[in-house]
Structures are given as C-alpha cells and as structure tokens.
Amino acid sequence: MNNVSHSRRLRDKIRIARGELDAVANTLWSHPRLREIYPEFLFRNHSVIRSSVPLMKTAAERCDKMLGTDPLADGLLAYFRKHIPEETGHDDWVLDDLETLGYRREDVLKRLPPPSAAALAGAQYYWIRHVHPVALLGFIAVLEGTPPDVAFFESTADRIGVPRRAFSNLLLHGKLDPQHRDDLDRTLDSLPLTESHHELMGISAFQTINLLTQVGREAVQ
Amino acid sequence: MSNIATLTQAGIIGPTAKLSPADQQIIESLTPTEVQALISIRAKLTPEFMSNNFSGTQSSLGIVF
C-alpha cells in the first residue's frame, strides 16, 4: 500500500467500512413516511453539524500550540484556518430548513441533542486533545465524502411535498462539498503523514461511520 | 492469522463474503489496532453492505460537515 496516496488510503478504508451507513441512508430517503420523519432527521443533523466549526477551532488551537514541534501542525493549521470560515453558519441552514417546516428555532435549540450525536463529536474532542488533531481529518473525510446529490434531493422534496427551500442545507452542501472533499484530499496528500497518523485517522473514520450510522438509524426509528 | 480471518471469525466479514482482490488488499493493510476497532464497533464488511457493491438509490445520509 506504500505507493498509494495518503488521501486514497483513507478513502479506501472509509469505503470498505461505510456500507451500513449507506444502507441506513437508503432506508431514510426511500422511507414511505419520509415527510413525517424529515423534521426529526433535520434535528439530528443539526445536533451533529453544530459541532463542525467548534471541533475545527479546537483542532486549530491544538495545532497552534504544536507549531515548531510537530511536522503536521503547520499544514493542518492552514487547512483549518481556511475551512473554518467556509463552514461557519451551516448549522443555521438546518435551522432555516426546520423553520420553513414550521419549527421555531428557539424550540429546536431547547431540545436536548441525542447522546449518539454527543458521542460522535465528543470522540473527536478526545482524539484532538489527547492524541493528535490529525484525527479530525478522518471525521471530516466521512462527513464530506459523499456529497448530497442535488438532483436527487430536489426531486425528493417535490416527491414528499415540501418546499425545496426546506432542503437548503442538503442542496447547498451538494454544491459545496465536492470542492471541500477535493481540498481535504489535497491537504492529506501534502502532509508528511506517518503510519501512526494513518492508523489514527482510520480509527477516527471507523468510529465516525459507526456513530453516524447510529444517528441516522435513530432518525428512521 | 490474517486480518480477513480475524474479521471473519469475529463476524465482521460474513462467512460467504466474496471480497474483491482490491478490498482484500485494503483489509490486509489494516493495522491490528484498526482491526480491533472494526470489531469493537461491530462493523459489517460483507459485500452486500460494502458501498462499491451497494445498489441503493442514495448513499449520502445527508448529515454533512
């Protein structure tokens, strides 16, 4: 595997492990009661996506402290500093979608997030603070790895009879995430990653797949 | 023991799974810690679950970053 790029190595690991996640996705989007389930999915989506920028800020802070002593710190810090503004406010898009469906923002924010979402983000805080911030790239690679298909979600909104603007989060990410995925791959390929870094990113990605599958499954139940 | 044998014994890979040579290579390249992580989270690496063989209509859960 030594002649395979860093990004390809991580993507391959994710591909072999993400089958159940894909199956849950298919169950969700083909569910006969999707119109009824969709707001609950959005709530769980918000519970996860609200942690994106704080996680990157935590990782950036750790990288900043590692500058000069860790060979990855400089490259990772540049990636997070570019990506933080790109991701800022995306949690509001989910709240906008819920508002379009008649749910008040303040009511959504008052609800306690599911433990599965807390575990998903919480694991990353652990890896970042206690092991190495490169772990977060495994998490991001899973979440940005399969950008939403814009045509599919436009037709899904039409099919279940909700305004397309209630799918704004998915439609906007469908346009943005292919570029973000490529940015991450370029970052991975530019970093002096060791076998130990690959192992950590792999475990972070496997754990992310597992917990994300749980979050998705709970939305369908 | 190979990674594939370990994962099969743990029920992570189904006993009748037919893995492609490329997938076998990826699985055998995993470290023991990664293999243990897959066992710990009870991942399913059976072909019908693996996305390269998955025939679903939408593989993006839509929980994005």
Image (cartoon, coloured by chain):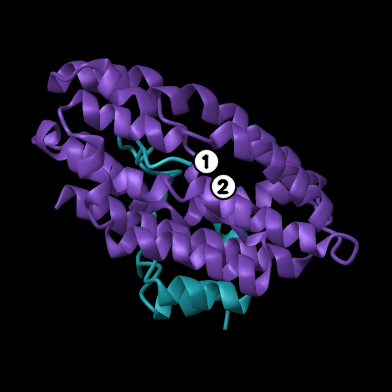
Chain colours: A purple, B cyan
Identity, as a three-letter code, of the amino acid under mark 2: Ala
Residue B45 visible in rendering: no
Residue name at image x 39 percent, y 50 percent: A48
Please provide percent x and percent y for residue A157: 22, 20
Q: Which residue is mark 1?
A: A145
Q: Is residue B54 left or right of residue A200?
A: left
What number of labels is visible?
2
Residue name at image x 75 percent, y 49 percent: A77
Quarter of the picture containing the N terminus of chain A is: bottom right
Element marked by disc 1: loop
User: Which disc is residue A141 wearing?
Assistant: 2
Please provide percent x and percent y for residue A167: 30, 24
Residue A43 visible in rendering: yes
Q: Are marks 2 and 1 in contact (CB under 8 Å)?
A: yes
Q: Is residue A164 left or right of residue A19?
A: left
Same chain for mark 2 and mark 1? The answer is yes
The quadrant in which residue A92 appears is: top left
Q: Chain of mark 2?
A: A
